[in-house]
Image (tube, helix red, strand yellow):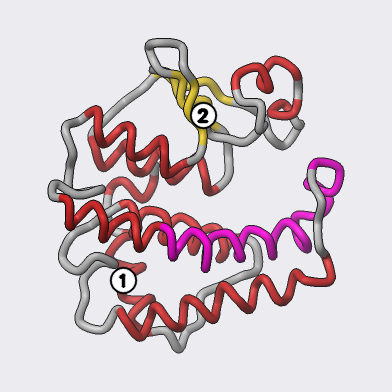
Amino acid sequence: MKLYNSVGPNPKVVRMFMAELGLELEQQKIDIMKGENRQAAYLEVNPGGQLPALELDSGMVISEITAICEYLDDSQGHTSLIGTTVDERAETRMWVRRIDLGIAENLASGFRSSEGMEMFKDRMTLIPHAAADFKALAQEKLTWLDGLMAGKTFVCGDRFSLADVMLFVFLEFGGQVGQPMNADNGNIAEWFARVQSRASASA
């Protein structure tokens, strides 16, 4: 298998997940800053132009970070990162969906439509007048999650999962692009420190 890799939070989610699995793959770096992901050569790999993408041994290419991570987990025989039981897998997928739609996507949309506008203005439709609202929605969902994290070690309780990986990477990214965590969300802050101490956090 080969991972098409780049800078940015989405590729880091996969790299961190791989590190948790102890999995190393061949990687090819794509320069998204120079728009290499929008050129014909990469679009033949992934017509959506996004990173990362995983090329399987069969030649099939999978994109979308949750699909990639679930495939890698399946290839390792189901680990606790997604879940070793039907119940655990459902729990992980529920939280990944909530974090992806409520926090990660709003955070990213807020960035692309403001600080990241110069990079993205010719690549996709942006909504600059909604940038502040996107950012506020992400923070609103984080505050909601903070209330649910009381007494929990990780998002899925005592089990570290893809939900934690995704949330950590996007909150880390937010701190780098003008969307720091709300200091009042003490449960999230404690959780973030726990995840940041893991070896995989530097993947």
Q: Is residue 157 left or right of residue 179?
A: left
CA neighbours of label 1 inside 10 A, class few (<14), some (14 to 19), many (20+): some
Query: How far from the left and from the top, in percent, is residue 136?
Result: 63, 78
Nearest to N terminus: mark 1 or mark 2: 2
The residue labelled by disc 2 is 53
The front one of 68 and 198 is 68
In the picture, the quarter occupied by the N terminus is: top left
* Count of numbered tags: 2
Q: Is residue 107 left or right of residue 152?
A: right
Q: Nearer the viewer, mark 1 or mark 2?
A: 2
Q: Is residue 78 above or below residue 165?
A: above
Which of the 4 image quarters holds residue 109?
bottom right
Query: How far from the left and from the top, in percent, is residue 58?
Result: 40, 10
In the picture, the quarter occupied by the C terminus is: top left
Dot 1 falls on a residue whose secondary structure is helix
- Asked whether residue 114 is drawn in magenta, I would say yes
The front one of 173 and 55 is 55
Q: Residue at x 68, y 34 (%)?
A: 32
Q: Is residue 181 left or right of residue 178?
A: left
Q: Residue at x 69, y 65 (%)?
A: 110
Give the magenta range.
97-123
The front one of 66 and 168 is 66
Amino acid carrying label 1: it is Trp
Query: How far from the left and from the top, in percent, is residue 97?
Result: 43, 59
Residue at the extreme top of the image, as rendered? 58
Q: Residue at x 65, y 68 (%)?
A: 178
Please, what is the dominant secondary structure of the magenta stretch?
helix
Q: Marks 1/2: CA distance?
A: 29 Å
Amino acid carrying label 2: it is Ala
Dot 2 falls on a residue whose secondary structure is strand
